[in-house]
Amino acid sequence: MSVDDAPAWKPSQSAYNTAAAACGEALHDMLLVAVHPWDIHGADAAGMQTAWINRSGSRYPGYFTQPTFEAQSLPSLARQLS
């Protein structure tokens, strides 16, 4: 998928809706994995579950919606989900 396929860029609701339609899934059944807190915030507002990959060990910004999951890497996220 590309942002070029969506009618607007993230964190617009329509970008997440476009991804859900392309996957044939409901937003609440999807998990967005990202390193950008603004993307986590937008996906949560759209109704998705979220996972923040915190590569730097920094604190998640309090002004954004907290992620459903937090991990330091994709392998550690996979372990949490299994």
Image (tube, rainbow, N blue to C red):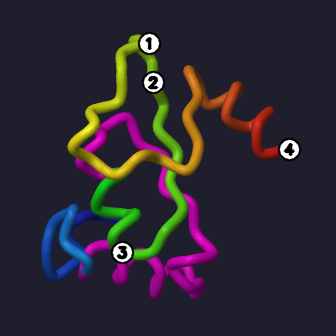
Which structural element holds mark 2?
loop
Question: Which is more N-terminal, label 4 or label 2?
Answer: 2
Q: Which mark is residue 57?
A: 1
Which structural element holds mark 4?
loop
As shown in the figure, which amino acid type bears the numbered disc 3?
Ala
The CA distance from mark 4 to mark 1 is: 22 Å
Mark 3 closeness class: few <14, some 14–19, many ≥20 residues within 10 Å: some
Q: Which mark is residue 46?
A: 3
Q: Which residue is mark 2?
A: 54
The region drawn magenta spans: 14-39
Question: Which is more N-terminal, label 4 or label 3?
Answer: 3
Q: Are marks 3 and 4 in contact (CB under 8 Å)?
A: no
Occupied quadrant, residue 14 = bottom left
Q: Residue at x 45, y 18 (%)?
A: 55
Occupied quadrant, residue 81 = top right
Mark 1 closeness class: few <14, some 14–19, many ≥20 residues within 10 Å: few
Single out the mark in the foreground, 4 or 1.
1
Q: Which residue is mark 4?
A: 82
Above or below, 67 relative to 72: below
Which quadrant would the N terminus be assigned to in this image?
bottom left
As shown in the figure, which amino acid type bears the numbered disc 1?
Gly
Which structural element holds mark 1?
loop
Residue 31 at x, y = what percent? 56, 60
Question: Which is more N-terminal, label 1 or label 4?
Answer: 1
Q: Are marks 3 and 1 in contact (CB under 8 Å)?
A: no
Which quadrant would the C terminus be assigned to in this image?
top right
Mark 2 closeness class: few <14, some 14–19, many ≥20 residues within 10 Å: some
As shown in the figure, which amino acid type bears the numbered disc 4?
Ser
Q: Taking 76 as reference, is 63 left or right?
A: left
The CA distance from mark 2 to mark 3 is: 21 Å
Question: Which is more N-terminal, label 3 or label 2?
Answer: 3
Question: Which is more N-terminal, label 1 or label 3?
Answer: 3
